[in-house]
Amino acid sequence: KNRRLPFGYKMEMGELTLHTQEAEVVRWVFGQYGEGMAYNRLVDKLNGQPIPYDEGKPWNKNMVARMLEDRRYIGEKGYPAIISVEAFDTARMIRDARTPPPKAQRRKSSSGSSAGKGAPRRWKHKPLPS
């Protein structure tokens, strides 16, 4: 079962409000990521604390990634803001810096040669060090 609302929010008497404990976790995630903590380390820490993302499901890096990409946390689409625009932008800049370029850009030859363009790259088998 998927969450109906983003982590950190709840419906209370027909109103979209902050889920206090979850909102604190959201602030913590953005703060720690903004200070350089990697997804896997965040997941380890989140799984060691008592507030689950979803009941009965351990945290994983996809949950963290979705959280760090969700603009609703800065108050978009009628959601109350949990974090500042600055915290969101910091996380986005870090994520962009850590994300490898798209495959099309990685395939360009550094020599500028057009040989083999359009053909799949063949893996060269190298012996493992002994």
Image (spheres, rainbow, N blue to C red):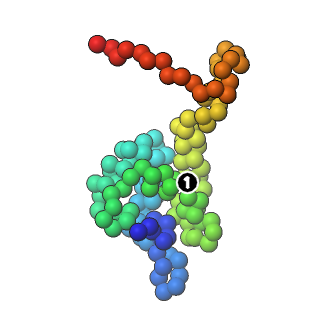
- Left/right placement of residue 130 relative to residue 14 reads left
Visible residue check, residue 51 = no
Quadrant placement of the N terminus: bottom left
- Left/right placement of residue 125 relative to residue 111 reads left
The part of the image, by quadrant, that contains residue 117 is top right
Residue depicted at 33% across the width and 61% down the height: 57
Give above or below for 76 relative to 89. Answer: below
Q: Nearer the viewer, residue 56 or 42?
A: 56
Residue 73, given in percent of the width and then of the height, sits at 55, 62
Give above or below for 11 relative to 65. Answer: below
Residue depicted at 47% across the width and 82% down the height: 12
Q: Secondary structure at mark 1?
A: helix
Residue depicted at 52% across the width and 85% down the height: 14
Give above or below for 15 relative to 52. Answer: below
Give above or below for 56 relative to 40. Answer: below
Quadrant placement of the C terminus: top left
Residue depicted at 49% across the width and 51% down the height: 65
Residue 110, given in percent of the width and then of the height, sits at 64, 18
Residue 115, given in percent of the width and then of the height, sits at 68, 17
The part of the image, by quadrant, that contains residue 26 is bottom left
Kindly identify the amino acid type of the residue bearing the numbered disc 1. Glu
Q: Residues within 10 Å of mark 1 (few under 14, many from 20)?
A: some
Q: Which residue is mark 1?
A: 69
Visible residue check, residue 12 = yes
Q: Nearer the viewer, residue 82 or 12?
A: 12
